[in-house]
Amino acid sequence: MAHGTSTTDAPAPEVEVARIGEEGNALTGWIQELFYTVDHKKLGLMYICTGLFFFVVAGCMAALIRIQLFFPNNDFLPPDVFNRFFTMHGTAMVFYVGMPILLGMGNYLVPLMIGARDMAFPRLNAFGFWAFFFSGILFYFSYLGAEGLYGAGSAPDVGWFAYSPLTAKAFSRGHSTDYWTLSLLLSGIGSIGTALNIIVTIICLRCRGMTLGRMPLFVWMFFVTSFLIIIAMPSLSACQIMLSFDRYLGSKFFDTQAGGDAVLWQHFFWIFGHPEVYILILPGFAVVSEVIPVFSRKPIFGYPIMVAATIMIGFISLTVWAHHMFTVGMTSLGNTFFAISTMIIAIPTGIKLFNWIGTMYGGKIRMELPMIFCIAFLFQFLIAGLTGVMLSVAPFDWQLSDSYFVVAHFHYVLIGGLLFTIFAATYYWYPKVTGRMLSNKLGHWHFWLFLIGFNLTFGPQHISGILGMPRRIFTYDAGRGWEIWNQISTIGVAFQAAGVLFYVINLIWSYWKGRKAGNDPWDAWTLEWAATSPPAGYNFETEPVVKSRRPLWDIKHPEDPDWKYE
């Protein structure tokens, strides 16, 4: 197995001048390379960078929403602008932040981890990215409509869930809903293409010795996630097509006055929407499953059980969608089924939590930044899981559905869970991608500011929800006991924004000034650390040969290889 790549002498100056003169300039050549590349690593970084850009945009909208809710009867944002902001924020965070960053991680790391040179279908890989990219442009292009930023119909305002009849022509004039529908339809096409590519790559391009039982848990979880995308995404696409037919071709799928069914939209949407939660969080689990063993200096506890729990989550997640719909008037039998399935899915999730703790128990833990973010994830995802089980009880959900308690639960899953694992992944794999280490000092500022800000923002929302504050309201009257909790939440956003600022500064500063990392700065065990930092275009000079789940351990410790214990 190669730990590096061969080097060649630098080209002669006259050759370099001729090359630059032929292409115009280095910047032009770099931009052209971005448009034409089919390299999985470059496409993965393009996914991630685009997702981070949308994260900043959506985060700014969230901050404006919280400023509006700081005081009772505040008029900082008009109600129609507030509706657009929370629609754009929610949609962007799910489809244009979470999805691209995670698909980018899979694009970059899965081929490296299985010893492959590239994805199975490089051009399909590029198509998937550009479909996502242009869908994002189309989504935000709605703000450039003739009505302008504050005009009627200038941007989607129906929530990221777009419940019927809010999306009917009578209630959503102009083309705002059409931008939402078409952009997500295009994004879904790209996501399905990328998921199919990941599945074929994992099945067909594993290196010699890389059996399914030796694949890293990271790869296993992306494998299951990709199947979930292929199964769940067509449901969202179908309801978007039906909505377009309703709006422009006169069909009546969701028009109750013409015999349609508004609840039908909710079923189609949540058949996608709840597996989507696991599409987002399983890659977060994948990061934790790689980081914790390395910084505990122990193999993952219960590898076969972790794989089985991942597959169980994939199956059960397809049966729980209607726990979002306890208040729509389903039968008692339906409520009971979805309550039980929601409780059952907590079992494999709990198995993962205990296995991560079991991995740390007795280990030589190194409190590096990736590990710190993962430990914070464990605590916050525990809160998310407990509140999720509470909401699975139909009578309890009846009381708190559409309250800020649900907002808090959802954000503890996707911010306290997913975003903290994305940060952990950044600090863990940034040296591999760039060849340089991120700053520990800036990283600790980022961690503590964001951790404090996150819990200040979303912890109090459990209380305001229990006190009866509805979600999706642009203001509220004084004297209801909600003011202090909203003010604490808004203050927390300022801490989060400061933490993200340190994160962005760290990414940029370390790229130019960070300490050189070497090929394996963490003394890790999976194949990507056998490549150079950053990896060469062909990943590995020779095809790796794997004999165990920790191939780099076998090389570093030939006297005690891992395969002896399999």
Image (cartoon, grey):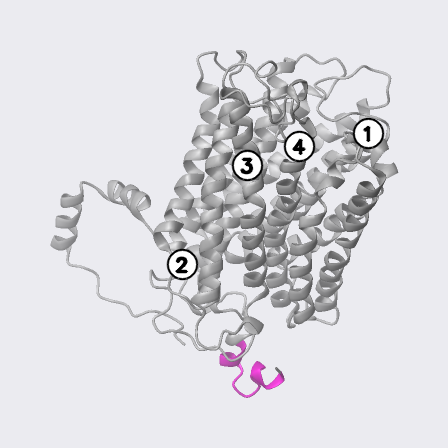
Disc 1/disc 3 C-alpha distance (Å) = 36 Å
Name the N-terminal-most of marks 1 and 3: 3
Disc 1/disc 4 C-alpha distance (Å) = 31 Å
Q: Are marks 1 and 3 in contact (CB under 8 Å)?
A: no
Name the N-terminal-most of marks 1 and 4: 4
Residue at the (73%, 56%) spot, across then down: 349
Q: Are marks 3 and 4 in contact (CB under 8 Å)?
A: no
Please state which amino acid type lies under the numbered disc 1: Ser
Residue 464, which numbered label? 1
Query: Residue 41: image x %, image y %?
Result: 40, 54
User: What SS does tag 1 mark?
Assistant: helix
| Residue with the mark numbered 4 | 264
Residue 238, which numbered label? 3
Name the N-terminal-most of marks 4 and 2: 2
Please state which amino acid type lies under the numbered disc 3: Ala
Front residue of this view, candidates 136 and 63: 136
Name the N-terminal-most of marks 2 and 1: 2
Asked if the magenta segment contains residue 469, the reply would be: no
Disc 2/disc 1 C-alpha distance (Å) = 47 Å
Would residue 339 be visible to someone looking at this image? yes
> Label 2 neighbourhood size at 10 Å, few (<14), some (14-19), many (20+)?
many
Disc 3/disc 4 C-alpha distance (Å) = 12 Å
| Residue with the mark numbered 2 | 119
Residue at the (66%, 32%) spot, across then down: 264
Start-end of magenta stretch: 553-565
